[in-house]
Image (tube, rainbow, N blue to C red):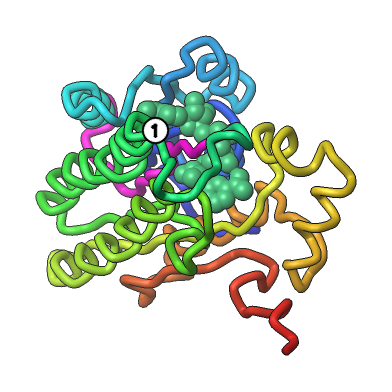
Amino acid sequence: MRVDMQGKVAVVTGAAQGIGRAIAEALVENGALVTIADVQEEKGRATAEALGPDVQFQACDVSDQAQVRALFDAVIARHGRLDAAVNNAGINTGRPEERVTVDRYSDEIWHRIVDVDLHGTFYCCKAETAQMVKQGSGAIVNIASIAGVVPLRLQIGFVAAKAAVIRMTEAMAAELGPAGIRVNSVSPGSTLVQGTRQLFYSNKETAERLVSFIPQRRPGETNEIAAAVLFLLSDAGSYVNGHNLIVDGGWTCGFSRDF
Ligand SMILES: NC(=O)c1ccc[n+]([C@@H]2O[C@H](COP(=O)([O-])OP(=O)(O)OC[C@H]3O[C@@H](n4cnc5c(N)ncnc54)[C@H](O)[C@@H]3O)[C@@H](O)[C@H]2O)c1
């Protein structure tokens, strides 16, 4: 996808790998100066190096507000502004035995997921908008999930956090539209990354069952999520504000409900 992000200062959290990496790559290919932030230091540095001289890495745990403040202070000290921000860092349960009904769902996992996926997004949005309000411009995309749109079973912490991210995005769009800032979210469906490959797509039977719920009969690729994010961040999406763009091959249309 080609849009004009020439010289735009951008930050992508959770970009050492997966969807975040694809977003950082799409931004840099379109001319942006990108800072990627992640808890994985070694991988984050290697990704920044692989993506070229316009990409910097900064270690940051988004669930720690002091680290989030330090990240954005460093970006603003380096570039003097912030044009685009993608709050992508997120976690979910990764093992089948953790995917259980609410009565058995771990308190510890609930708190960890809400800390990263919801509180982390809030801390980032707060730091980003503090600068964008001063500038009178900026665009933010929060990465949510179809789990925040429809009530998927056995993932109560993730469902709650992502639903809150979508509603928070709309509230911020309403608050900050008058200040020249657009805030949108992207909700991926099942997307091929290291974690989903291990959890779903390495087993033929599980993979077939999963894609049977997806009208396009395949998982998404990370660059397909990145294209949606790029649209919302760029001037191509200049009048889109407070929108949750679902990129799921049609999963949430309820295609499988043929009765
Ligand atoms: N892959 C999917 O099917 C899918 C579906 C719906 C939503 N999502 C969302 O997309 C986003 C990216 O996920 P992904 O699939 O690329 O997963 P991933 O695990 O491959 O990537 C997530 C990245 O976030 C980083 N991260 C984790 N905790 C962090 C923290 N506290 N601070 C900073 N960085 C942290 C990880 O180190 C990793 O690099 C997440 O918000 C996820 O919830 C993914």
Residue 208: x and y in percent read 85, 55
Look at the numbered disc 1 and say if its residue's Cβ is closer than 8 Å to ligand 1.
no
Query: Which residue is tagged 1?
Result: 109
Q: State the residue in front, 103 or 67.
A: 103
At numbered mark 1, what does the secondary structure look like: helix, strand or loop? helix
Residue 195: which quarter of the image? top right
Q: Give the residue drawn at x 51%, y 19%.
A: 44
Q: Give the residue drawn at x 71%, y 44%.
A: 192
Q: Is residue 24 visible?
A: no
Residue 146: x and y in percent read 52, 62
Residue 97: x and y in percent read 59, 34
Q: Which residues are magenta?
A: 78-93
Q: What residue type is disc 1 on? A: Ile
Q: Residue furthest bottom?
A: 259
Residue 248 colored in magenta in the image: no
- Quarter that holds the C terminus: bottom right
Q: Residue furthest top?
A: 42
Residue 7: which quarter of the image? top left
Q: Give the residue drawn at x 28%, y 65%.
A: 167
